[in-house]
Image: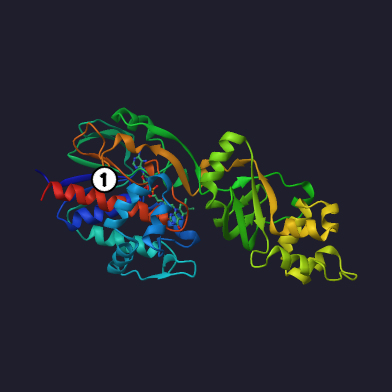
């Protein structure tokens, strides 16, 4: 049997498969429709590439929600520690940030990607085919690519597709593969925004002279779950890590109810009683804004938000004001468009695949990475999930030939 694998999609999932298969003596063909590799991975590095997380594995795998069992198996085979060791092997040191998240020391993706690609290219068995857009695939492994306005057909033995989700189309992850993947007999669940912002209705007064800015050191509560984090207030609504962590549950709620309410704790380090005590001090000649700033050390943006969301009457009543500072409701209307979101829910459902992610009824077509229907919050769980899947599938192909 020829030890040759064709991988389509040069994001982290495809690139890691290429790495492992080359290490094990395979001839590897890697295709991507873009003119470069890892475009979304590079974008992920813009905000500080969060590769994985250092928390206990038991807690770690819970982040995959209904797919916890699948990821428990995958992450036991290729763990966050394994990922850090692999980066180190490439020459990229990582560190654990104060929140337990793991980053490369440079915080960016470019150095890691360039050393990774250099390593692949150092093998004579590596063949990179850029500007190759996959347009169809048959169950017996015939791939058709659109290249230079022509169609090229390739007959393959083992094929791994890692075509990504449906957000940030400009990185190549356009989700257009749905049409031809369904012909393999798998079911594809419609994409929806995940780890995304939400819109709300700010008043005209609120938006006057407004610039996007962060609310820091707050807690965000949804459905009785409170998460410490940051929130960016934007002209359309809210963004940021604190809301991304709730985005899956908010999305489900919005679909059924049309709108959803979150609650902000603007002073999570103080109890309601402490807040009330501070509000009970004489205000003197201070305006409400000045008083809130001096007594509670609230930021300008927090005060602007209180003025937007708390009525004048409530502001006059210390008890009601303390309630609002500890539990300020914001009504969310809808998720931001898919193309803006960090990840997408939906994709190929697991039922159509075996435990190595091989499509049922095919000899050797595997689907992995974000193109499958799984979700995880930000915190490094998305990339770790992709790496662990790529590790598992590559190992399964390697073991077929040994
Ligand atoms: C702004 C942003 C920040 C992020 N930050 C983080 C973070 O800090 N930590 C984290 O864990 N995750 C983060 N992510 C998510 C993470 O980048 C993705 O989960 C990950 O890149 C998915 O990897 P993948 O290889 O499965 O797919 P992708 O990286 O999406 O790669 C898919 C590849 O397939 C190619 N392709 C698609 N269709 C075709 C076709 N028909 N023919 C040929 N090629 C095709 C695309 O061009 C693309 O190169 C972030 C994402 C975004 C958008």
Q: Of helix, strand and loop, which one carries label 1?
A: strand
Q: Can residue 148 be seen by looking at this rendering? A: no
Q: Is residue 291 left or right of residue 243?
A: right
Q: Is residue 271 above or below residue 306?
A: below
Q: Quadrant of residue 220?
A: bottom right
Instruction: Find residue 397 and report its horizontal and vertical position in percent.
Output: 18, 47
Mark 1, residue position: 7
Q: Is residue 349 above or below residue 223?
A: above
Who's the residue at 27% across and 68% down the image?
89
- Relative to the observer, which residue lies in front, 301 or 123? 301
Instruction: Find residue 142 and report its horizontal and vertical position in percent.
Output: 22, 33
Instruction: Find residue 8 and report its horizontal and vertical position in percent.
Output: 29, 43
> Which quadrant is home to the N terminus?
top left
The residue carrying mark 1 has its beta carbon less than 8 Å from ligand 1: no
Q: Is residue 133 left or right of residue 209?
A: left
Q: Can residue 200 be seen by looking at this rendering? A: yes
Say few, some or many: other residues with alpha carbon within 10 Å of mark 1 (under 14 / 14 to 19 / 20 or more).
many
- Relative to the observer, which residue lies in front, 254 or 59? 59
């Amino acid at each position: 049997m020829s030890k040759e694998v064709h991988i389509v999609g040069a994001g982290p999932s495809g690139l890691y498969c290429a790495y492992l298969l080359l290490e094990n003596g395979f001839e590897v063909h890697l295709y991507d429709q873009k003119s470069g590799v890892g475009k979304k991975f590079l974008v992920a590095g813009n905000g500080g590439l969060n590769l994985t997380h250092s928390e206990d594995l038991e807690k770690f795998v819970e982040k995959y929600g209904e797919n916890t069992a699948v990821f428990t198996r995958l992450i036991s085979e290729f763990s966050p520690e394994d990922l850090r060791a692999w980066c180190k092997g490439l020459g990229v040191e990582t560190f654990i940030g104060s929140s337990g998240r793991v980053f490369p020391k440079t915080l960016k993706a470019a150095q890691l990607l360039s050393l990774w690609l250099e390593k692949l290219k150092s093998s004579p068995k590596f063949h990179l085919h850029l500007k190759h857009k996959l347009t169809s695939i048959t169950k017996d492994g015939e791939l058709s690519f659109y290249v230079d306005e022509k169609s090229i057909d390739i007959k393959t033995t083992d094929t791994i597709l890692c075509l990504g989700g449906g957000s940030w189309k400009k990185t190549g992850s356009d989700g257009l593969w749905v049409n031809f993947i369904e012909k393999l007999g798998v079911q594809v669940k419609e994409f929806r925004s995940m780890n995304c912002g939400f819109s709300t209705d700010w008043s005209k007064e609120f938006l006057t002279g407004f610039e996007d800015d962060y609310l820091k050191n707050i807690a965000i509560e949804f459905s009785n779950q409170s998460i410490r984090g940051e929130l960016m207030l934007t002209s359309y609504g809210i963004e940021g890590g604190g809301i991304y962590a709730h985005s899956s549950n908010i999305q489900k709620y919005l679909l059924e109810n049309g709108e959803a309410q979150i609650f902000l704790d603007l002073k999570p380090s103080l109890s309601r009683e402490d807040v009330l005590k501070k509000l009970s001090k004489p205000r003197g000649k201070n305006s409400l804004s000045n008083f809130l700033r001096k007594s509670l050390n609230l930021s300008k943006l927090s005060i602007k938000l209180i003025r937007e969301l708390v009525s004048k009457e409530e502001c006059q009543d210390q008890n009601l004001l303390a309630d609002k500072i500890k539990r300020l409701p914001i009504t969310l209307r809808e998720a931001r468009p898919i193309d803006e979101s960090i990840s997408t829910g939906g994709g190929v459902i697991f039922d159509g695949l075996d435990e190595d992610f091989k499509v049922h009824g095919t000899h050797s077509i595997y689907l992995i990475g974000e193109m499958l229907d799984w979700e995880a919050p930000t915190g490094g769980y998305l990339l770790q999930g992709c790496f662990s899947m790529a590790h598992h599938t590559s190992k399964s192909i390697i073991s077929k030939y040994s």
